[in-house]
Image (cartoon, rainbow, N blue to C red):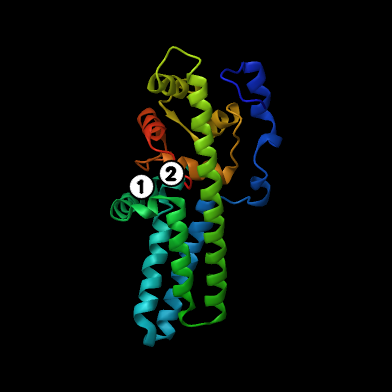
């Protein structure tokens, strides 16, 4: 798909239906990072709680493992607001998530959370049982997956900016006016928000397809108020923000 300043709908529409344009990463990683991290947070908290009941000599380390396991769980709350059966339960959790991210901005990024997963992995090794090793291996694998996703998604978001800037040069609008129009064009249901599917369609139209896992990471970067939606203001803020190599 050749990158140009303009594209016709006849050229774009077939791409929206072709699975082959999606990243090969999606075939390898079926589950999203949010689902895996939520499972890791719950699993880590459970393992650390069991260790605490059987090994009081390492009480502080087990307590830390429980605490950070709960933090990992809460940090994934906003990713599940789109699910109708979970949204009501997640609203209070999102308040705690925003509080954590306010005081620890590192955890608002995917690569920052990867460091948290690694830290939790080593906390789980305190007792050295088979469950501890299983939890350790899971969290290390999750951290590696998160780092790879942060790298690939950051690169693609930067490429998306470059393509859209190139498109804007062929118009009489300034950058902000162009990005606002682009938002309106891809807000297909006129809801005032771009959902995950619309974000992926926008990226495909620009020749930069995202896998499901990458789309989730990108959505998490743009959705700064953690309400599960990307509005026009957030889209413009992302546009103006300096590009980052890692998401």
Q: Is residue 225 left or right of residue 215?
A: left
Q: Are the residues at dot 2 and dot 1 in contact (C-beta closer than 8 Å)? A: yes
Q: Residue furthest bottom?
A: 57
Q: Classify 78 as above or below 177.
A: below
Nearer-N-terminus badge (2/1): 2
Is residue 47 at all visible to an observer of this figure? Answer: no
* Label 2 Cα crowd, 10 Å radius (few <14 / some 14-19 / many 20+): many
Q: Secondary structure at mark 2?
A: loop
Task: Name above or below for residue 140 compared with residue 54.
Answer: above
Marks 2 and 1, Cα distance to the nearest angstrom? Answer: 7 Å
Residue 81 marker: 2
Residue 216 location (% of width, % of height): 51, 44
Residue 124: which disc? none
Who's the residue at 35% across and 47% down the image? 91
Identify which residue is drawn at 43% across, 85% down. 54
Query: Residue 157: x and y, percent?
Result: 50, 38
- Relative to the observer, which residue lies in front, 165 or 24? 165
Is 95 positioned to the left or the right of 230 in the image? left
| Quadrant housing residue 183 | top left
Corner quadrant of residue 243: top left
Residue under pointer 1? 91
Up/down of 3 relative to 31, above or below:
above
Residue 1 pos. (x, y %)? 67, 27
Q: Is residue 26 visible?
A: yes
Residue neighbourhood size for the residue with mark 1, other residues' Cα within 10 Å, grouped as few (<14), some (14–19), many (≥20): some
């Amino acid at each position: 798909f050749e990158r140009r300043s303009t594209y016709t709908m006849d050229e774009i529409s077939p791409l929206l239906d072709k699975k082959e344009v999606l990243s090969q990463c999606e075939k390898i990683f079926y589950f999203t990072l949010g689902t895996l991290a939520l499972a890791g947070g719950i699993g880590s908290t459970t393992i650390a709680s069991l260790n605490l009941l059987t090994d009081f000599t390492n009480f502080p380390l087990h307590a830390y493992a429980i605490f950070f396991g709960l933090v990992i769980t809460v940090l994934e709350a906003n990713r599940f607001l789109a699910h109708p059966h979970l949204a009501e339960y997640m609203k209070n959790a999102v308040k705690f998530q925003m509080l954590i991210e306010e005081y620890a901005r590192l955890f608002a990024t995917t690569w920052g959370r990867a460091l948290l997963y690694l830290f939790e992995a080593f906390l789980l090794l305190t007792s050295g049982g088979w469950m501890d090793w299983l939890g350790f291996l899971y969290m290390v694998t999750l951290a590696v997956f998160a780092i790879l996703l942060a790298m690939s998604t950051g690169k693609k978001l930067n490429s998306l900016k470059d393509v859209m800037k190139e498109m804007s040069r062929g118009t009489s609008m300034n950058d902000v006016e162009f990005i606002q129009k682009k938002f309106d064009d891809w807000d297909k249901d006129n809801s005032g928000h771009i959902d995950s599917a619309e974000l992926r369609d926008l990226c495909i139209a620009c020749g930069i397809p995202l896998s499901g896992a990458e789309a989730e990471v990108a959505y998490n970067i743009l959705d700064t108020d953690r309400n599960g939606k990307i509005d026009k203001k957030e889209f413009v803020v992302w546009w103006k923000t300096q590009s980052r190599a890692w998401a």
